[in-house]
Image: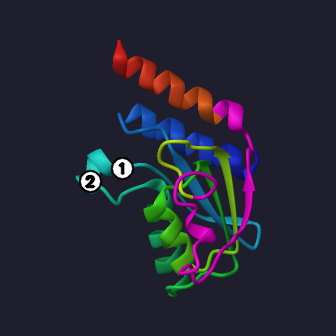
């Protein structure tokens, strides 16, 4: 199973909990050190995005606010809040599945990492397992509308 497939599994779990199906895994040295999906409803916390949750868990596990040897795999292009957290944590590489034209802040919207005030920008790889990630989101929102 690839790291993105693990992130997709976390997204599926989030969807089953009634959360927007977004999942993330944080990897260091070829091992997953944190995994989670969105939990904003469950925790009544608007910052409980998958990316933020795995960054918090990894920083706690590694006992450091900066985790420059880590790579993040996430099923949707990070928003501005998550992009800022990625930058502040000094994450080495960001891999994301589907772009987010409305809320994304990496290749859409404010393009956080291109901002002159951004202190650290990870290497970015987009479109990995994009079709299954989009399918999860599309099914979730179609279910909400019906």
Percent position of residue 109, x then y: 53, 53
User: What number is the disc on residue 43?
Assistant: 2
Question: From what the image shows, is residue 91 above or below residue 111?
Answer: below
Residue 85 appears at what percent x and percent y?
48, 71
Q: Mark on residue 39?
A: 1
Which of the 4 quarters of the picture holds residue 47?
Answer: bottom left
Tell me if residue 131 is in the magenta stretch: yes
Q: Position of residue 40 (x, y in %)?
A: 32, 50
What predominant SS class does the magenta segment belong to? loop
Q: Residue at x 66, y 82 (%)?
A: 68
| Residue 5 at x, y percent in the picture | 69, 43
The local crowd at label 2, few if under 14, some if 14 to 19, many if 20 or more residues have their Cα within 10 Å, is few
Q: Secondary structure at mark 1?
A: loop
Give the structural element (helix, strand or loop) at label 2: helix
Q: Are marks 1 and 2 in contact (CB under 8 Å)?
A: yes
For the N terminus, the image quarter is: top right
Question: What residue sits 36% from the left and 50% below the top?
Answer: 39
Residue 22 located within the stretch drawn in magenta = no
Q: Is residue 28 left or right of residue 14?
A: right
Q: Is 61 positioned to the left or the right of 125 in the image?
A: left
| Of 113 and 127, the residue lying toward us | 113
Q: Is residue 136 left or right of residue 46?
A: right
Q: CA distance from mark 1 to mark 2?
A: 6 Å
Q: Quadrant of residue 131?
A: top right
Along the line of sight, the residue nearer the viewer: 64 or 134: 134
Q: Which residues are magenta?
A: 106-132
């Amino acid at each position: 199973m690839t790291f993105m497939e693990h992130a997709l599994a976390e997204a599926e779990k989030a969807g089953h909990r009634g959360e927007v199906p977004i999942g993330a895994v944080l990897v260091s040295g070829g091992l997953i050190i944190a995994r989670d999906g969105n939990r904003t409803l469950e925790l009544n916390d608007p910052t409980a995005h998958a990316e933020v949750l795995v960054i918090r868990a990894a920083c706690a596990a590694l006992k450091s606010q900066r985790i420059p040897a880590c790579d993040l795999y996430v099923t949707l292009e990070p928003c501005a809040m998550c992009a800022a957290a990625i930058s502040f944590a000094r994450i080495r590489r960001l891999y994301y599945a589907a772009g987010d034209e409305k809320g994304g802040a990496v290749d859409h919207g404010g393009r956080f990492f291109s901002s002159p005030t951004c202190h650290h920008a990870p290497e970015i790889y987009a479109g990995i397992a994009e079709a299954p990630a989009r399918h999860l989101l599309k099914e979730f929102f179609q279910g909400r509308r019906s």
